[in-house]
Amino acid sequence: MEFKQGDRVRIEKNGTVYEGRVMPSMEGYITIKMDNGYNAGFSTDRVKITLLEGNGESTNGGENSAKESRETGEEVTKPGKKLPKVAILSTGGTIASKVDYRTGAVTSQFTADDILAAIPELKEIADFKGRVISSILSENMDVGAWEKLASAVVEEIKDGADGIIITHGTDTMMYTAAALSFMIETPVPIVLVGSQRSADRPSSDSAMNAICAARVAVSDIAEVSVVMHGTTSDDYCEIHRGTKVRKMHTSRRDAFKSINSLPIGTVDYNTGEIKTFTNYIKRGERPLKFKPGMEPKCALVKFTPDADPDILDYYIRGGYRGLVLEGTGLGHVSTKWVPLIQKATDSKIPVVVTSQCLNGRVCDRVYNTGRDMLKAGAIEGEDTLPETALVKLMWVLGQTDEYNEAISMLRENLSGEITECCFK
Amino acid sequence: MEFKQGDRVRIEKNGTVYEGRVMPSMEGYITIKMDNGYNAGFSTDRVKITLLEGNGESTNGGENSAKESRETGEEVTKPGKKLPKVAILSTGGTIASKVDYRTGAVTSQFTADDILAAIPELKEIADFKGRVISSILSENMDVGAWEKLASAVVEEIKDGADGIIITHGTDTMMYTAAALSFMIETPVPIVLVGSQRSADRPSSDSAMNAICAARVAVSDIAEVSVVMHGTTSDDYCEIHRGTKVRKMHTSRRDAFKSINSLPIGTVDYNTGEIKTFTNYIKRGERPLKFKPGMEPKCALVKFTPDADPDILDYYIRGGYRGLVLEGTGLGHVSTKWVPLIQKATDSKIPVVVTSQCLNGRVCDRVYNTGRDMLKAGAIEGEDTLPETALVKLMWVLGQTDEYNEAISMLRENLSGEITECCFK
């Protein structure tokens, strides 16, 4: 018997009974979302499956294509109540992944429609439309993909979306979130969400993350944010500002942390309640403004002891337009690097200093090395994350060719990336 | 009137009275260590100073020289009890720093003798001898300085030291700790210690860190460790394994954290009690073994989205002998980097993959990109920190010219840098 996505089924395996709704599954396998929010996957020839409730929608039968797919949720559960409109833009990644039987590894192949079918609760929160922007693993995201995604977000907002959800691989989600933060001034929430476990694994976090993301998308938090598990339990998600978030664990569900800032807030998984901890820009507070244009020829250079300063010259020779240094401590590199910083700034290549400590603020005024770096023209990145500093530099150099204008933009807090100084 | 280091004085300023012992001070200034453990500095022409107890030792009057200086603590407080012998090797850094009036910034200029004079409690813990190894800020540490320091440590152990304290700038302390961990198998504790605030600042953490380091130096923990404040209060220090520690804040006193491991233990500042949380190698458990030799031509490359893979070719062309990648998530770089990984390994250049998440374990077997990286010859760094992985690579390539031997050493846990896998 064939089961369709969304069908409610009972599965018996070795005397244990599992009940839930059918998720997108590979041939020969069935994955269900159980009532506790977890997913479980089974080989169909080893279990007994019984249909409990056949309200599933038809699967699209085969590989997803990158065609645009439209709203699927006709059956809004509360007729009479007009739900906000949310666009789900999918870019690939674990939240939309399945096992590739060519290699046995996981690839990203699901569409927003698949996610809506797999997580029926979403339809109670908003009136969704799905749209596939790309289908790549996040380590392959690039400046072109950021700009394509930003354009699509802007189109959807112009088209009346009350909120945007972007499904994204977690590996480079922080870089994409930063890129959108600089490119778009938004009147509505733009929420990036992903999963640390693929949807076919029992401990998948996809459903909870997606549901919390939807709550934020219909909230009044008109910022670019990342919404992911706040703890290893399924209790709440954290809402991280797009310029202050970092993936701090390779595999834990609560891998994402706000650095040098509290999260904007949390979303309770059970009640949907949002609590906020920081100031944020409110829905409708500012008009939509799209400022695309990024310079890809920028590099992040992590300093390590005894590293040859020629690496800076390599980038200068290569026509790079900006450099971010990830220095030690308060923002230091060895003194033999200082002449190369001077060479870069003499060539009108901005050099922004950040710290490999990640936490805390760069301050190059305390020690001689830092002072020499400043004298050579380096700019302190303050408490900006190294990764965000790189994306900011790319964006700033995409906005202006004037070195001095770039320098003054780099010193400014443009999108929450620098918090006001509390300690020097 | 001239005051000497160790003199007990009363200082009156604007009606407030401060009492404490004179620390090494700059001309025109007086710095005292107060009874609460904090230091305070004053301009001598703005305060009234009264000598309370003149048991100070003579200051060495002027710039310190790099000459070797011997034991100063004749006045051992508990006659009859033989104290363990501890060598304090100073390399520079904040724990041994003062303000440079040329630039107004802080440089490192104090000797071990100065530290002993400033922190009289140390003499109750051990019988110290001081020795200046170098006097540089830690961002200028290099492979040569690591080897010089390691040689001095080994000499002191051979000479009968029951423990070693190394005062070090905090910026690159983790790299030096890792280097010593690989170069020396030690029968006695080797403790690195520093300060996040210079000794002339009221909130200096020098004294507590130095006292806790001394407790560890006379303990049975025969490992290379970093001993620094465990919290922002002056309650206890943490003892971090040299291969598992990272500076995680630019300025906080409790900047050092064990990553992917508990600290070895803690030292209570008040009682001196040591509690341990992990297994550790005990005093005398293994004989002294010195394995110097490090290959400086190794690089740590941090991957960022859209980064040009030519950076790998730059290092291959430049005759580099090993590369550490700091990838995203479980240890990924973009697929366009994979052919360059292949080129490196074809040229017998080991490529070790670590994660910019820092926490968690690299696993390149889950996603296609990782599998392709492994196929190209990359080695998973498991849960090794990127910085430790670089130092390990330098050391391994200093030990062997055989590619296959290097690869198998890189896969092994050599000095606590890899913890046994608990989750994949």
Image (cartoon, coloured by chain):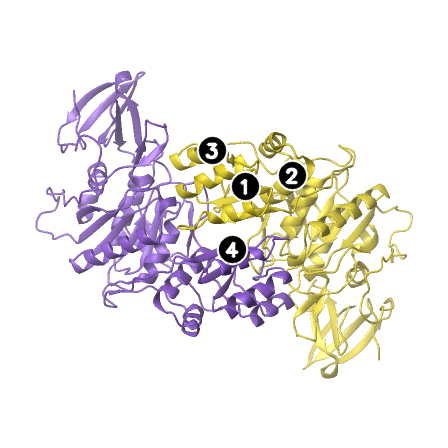
Chain colours: A yellow, B purple
Q: Is residue A93 left or right of residue A152?
A: left
In the picture of the structure, the residue carrying the numbered disc 2 is: A397
In the picture of the structure, the residue carrying the numbered disc 1 is: A260
The reply to whether label 2 and label 3 mark residues of one chain is yes
Which circle, 2 or 1, is nearer the viewer? 2
Q: CA distance from mark 2 to mark 1?
A: 25 Å
Q: Earlier in the sequence, mark 2 or mark 3?
A: 3
Q: CA distance from mark 4 to mark 1?
A: 24 Å
- Position of residue B147 relative to residue A339, above or below, is below
Subunit of mark 1?
A
Residue type (three-letter) at the residue carrying disc 3: Leu
Q: Is residue B151 left or right of residue A405?
A: left
The reply to whether label 2 and label 1 mark residues of one chain is yes
Residue type (three-letter) at the residue carrying disc 4: Val
Residue at left offset 50%, top offset 33%: A377
Residue type (three-letter) at the residue carrying disc 1: Asn
Residue B95: percent from the left, percent from the top?
31, 40
Check residue A374 in the rendering and tell me which mark sits there, or answer none.
3
Q: In the figure, residue B11 lies in which quadrant? A: top left
